């Protein structure tokens, strides 16, 4: 009996997911595993490091059950990777963003960029409070290298590394004090941060709010290109979930 060529060929394996399709999960199960708290198909950064959480597969209810148990009922979290949360989950804020990759960025170091560390956290938190670039907690500085520029001893601009999926590093917390905008400080710090990422062998990427067209144009001028649209949720686990 003959066998058709089609049936004789082995089934092709499904293509591996790109690390940036679920960057929080990839980071927490890769280079940033030391900062992770995990349970089953869910993981999160330590709350003092970052509010971001992840599930292995947003379409699998088991991951959300694991996440609810991990975070605890009524507790807040940040999530990206799904257009909507499961029914019954509280949504505090949701918004659309763009994910951009820096494969074409020409990174350069900047002599004025000063490394920032734990001793600088109070100043960093003050700058974040003035500029609101996104989530930044007391231990966020542990996620990677952060750099700042000072004027008369005062921190007026900063940028650094956040998520680190394998082979990639996110540039985040890009902010400039309102009194010092228009001087190109953010661009300089992004390129300086990208230089450190490239030296490590990673490729920089970042996220921007879709409505922040000015920032998107700036990143495009530096060599970043849009990869895909993303959704961000700042929400709470349904009350009554046991931890």
Image (cartoon, grey):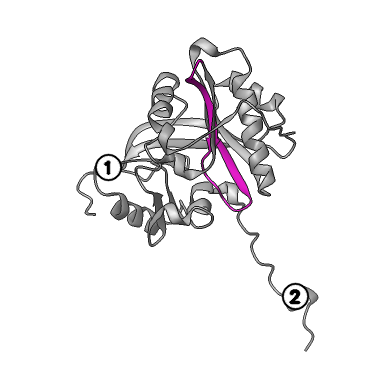
Q: Quadrant of the C terminus?
A: bottom left
Label 1 vs label 2, nearer the camera? 1
Q: Is residue 49 magenta?
A: no
Instruction: Please identify the residue farthest to the top as the structure is shown.
Output: 179
Q: Circle 2: is it few (<14), some (14-19), or many (20+) Cα within 10 Å?
A: few
Which dot marks residue 58? none
Where is mark 1, residue-wise? Answer: 75
Q: Earlier in the sequence, mark 1 or mark 2?
A: 2
Q: Is residue 152 left or right of residue 69?
A: right
Q: At 68% from the left edge and 71% from the top edge, which residue is drawn?
A: 11
Instruction: Please identify the residue farthest to the left as the structure is shown.
Output: 240
Q: At 41% from the left edge and 19% from the top edge, which residue is drawn?
A: 130
Q: Is residue 125 left or right of residue 17?
A: left
Q: Quadrant of the N terminus?
A: bottom right
Q: CA distance from mark 1 to mark 2?
A: 50 Å
Q: At 43% from the left edge and 39% from the top edge, which residue is drawn?
A: 140
Task: Residue 107: tell me if it is visible.
Answer: yes
Where is mark 2, residue-wise? Answer: 9
Q: Is residue 170 magenta?
A: yes
Magenta residues, start to end: 152-172
Q: Position of residue 149 (x, y in %)?
A: 55, 24
Instruction: Please identify the residue farthest to the front as the structure is shown.
Output: 153
Q: Position of residue 165 (x, y in %)?
A: 56, 50
């Amino acid at each position: 009996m003959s066998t058709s060529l089609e049936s004789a060929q082995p089934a092709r394996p499904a293509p591996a997911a790109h690390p940036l399709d679920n960057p929080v999960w990839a980071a927490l199960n890769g280079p940033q595993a030391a900062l992770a708290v995990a349970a089953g198909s869910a993981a999160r950064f330590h709350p003092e490091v970052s509010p971001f959480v992840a599930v292995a597969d947003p379409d699998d209810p088991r991951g959300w059950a694991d996440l609810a148990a991990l975070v605890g009922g009524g507790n807040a979290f940040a999530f990206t990777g799904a257009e909507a949360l499961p029914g019954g989950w509280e949504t505090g804020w949701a918004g659309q963003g763009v994910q951009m990759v820096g494969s074409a960025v020409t990174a350069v170091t900047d002599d004025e960029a000063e490394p920032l560390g734990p001793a600088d956290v109070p100043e960093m938190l003050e700058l974040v409070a003035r500029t609101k670039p996104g989530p930044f907690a007391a231990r966020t500085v542990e996620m990677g290298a952060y750099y700042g520029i000072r004027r008369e001893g005062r921190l007026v601009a900063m940028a650094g590394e956040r998520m680190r999926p394998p082979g990639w590093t996110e540039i985040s917390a890009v902010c400039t004090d309102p009194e010092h905008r228009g001087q190109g400080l953010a661009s300089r710090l992004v390129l300086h941060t990208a230089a450190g990422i490239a030296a490590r062998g990673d490729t920089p990427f970042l996220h921007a709010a879709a409505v922040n067209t000015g920032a998107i144009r700036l990143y495009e001028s530096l060599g970043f290109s849009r990869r895909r649209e993303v959704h961000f949720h700042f929400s709470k686990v349904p009350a009554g979930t046991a931890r």
